[in-house]
Image (cartoon, rainbow, N blue to C red):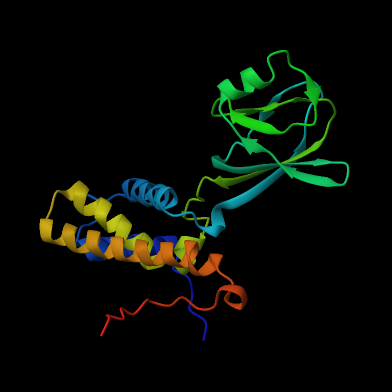
Amino acid sequence: YFIMAITYTNFLTQVRNYTEVSSTVLSDTLLDQFIRNTELAIAGAVDYDDLRKFSNSTFTSSNRAVSLPGDLLYLRAVKITSGSSEIFLEKRDQTFIAEFNPDGDTGVPKYYANYNDKNIIVAPTPSSALAIQIQYVKNPPHFDSTTSTMLSDQHENLLLYGVLVECFSYLKGPQDMYNLYKTRYDTELQAFALEQMGSRRRGQYTDGTPRTPVPAPSP
């Protein structure tokens, strides 16, 4: 059978039911911020597949700088296409780029480095408009009245417990309820991480199923 994903309005109602606090204290605006805080915290803790994204563009000839996508949270890899070859650039520091290519020599880029939060630089400086692909993790989408997300659709408990932690921290008590939901949030977060960074990154054909080692003491 099919389980309907929770709506935004019902989610806010659920949070208020758990906290037993009305909208005069936990307003829609406040709960919306708590949802966003939780989404950002989860994205910072777990590298989950829904946030992986690719951006394709081309170099500007004789320009070593490359603009990063506006929704980039952090960079995973940089790949270029030169002729029929696809090449992943090697990550280096800005100081390495300056030493490696002090005169701005052009050619097929081999290295890249973070320049600031909006650009990377490459070396050698590209001699032509080669294709470049930025592989990155994007800012998490926000669950609101018009947008459902992977977290709200498939991991409602994780999102709920995270928001309840925010609520009981804001309400300053009771401490036992804060501890209860913090423990549940941490448990759900760990399970989510094991799914996304464990099971979903394994292939059972090549890796088999995960097994727990059983101690075998010497006789």
The residue shown at (73%, 13%) is: 103
Q: Is residue 24 above or below residue 104?
A: below
Q: Is residue 56 left or right of residue 114?
A: right
- For this view, does 46 lie left or right of residue 85? left
Depth order, front residue of 68/166: 68
Q: What residue lies at 80% left-to-right and 31% top-to-bottom?
A: 108
Residue at the outermost top position: 103
Residue sitting at x 12%, y 61%: 176
| Residue 196, position as x, y percentages in the image | 49, 63
Picture coordinates of residue 201, whole percent (x, y): 55, 64
Residue at image point 54% right, 78% down = 208
Q: What x and y, as percent, mark residue 92?
A: 58, 31
Residue 31 can be seen in this image: yes
Q: Is residue 68 above or below residue 127?
A: below
Q: Can the viewer see residue 174 in this picture? A: no
Residues 117 and 13: in front is 117
| Front residue (pair 152, 119) | 119
Quadrant assignment, res 71: top right
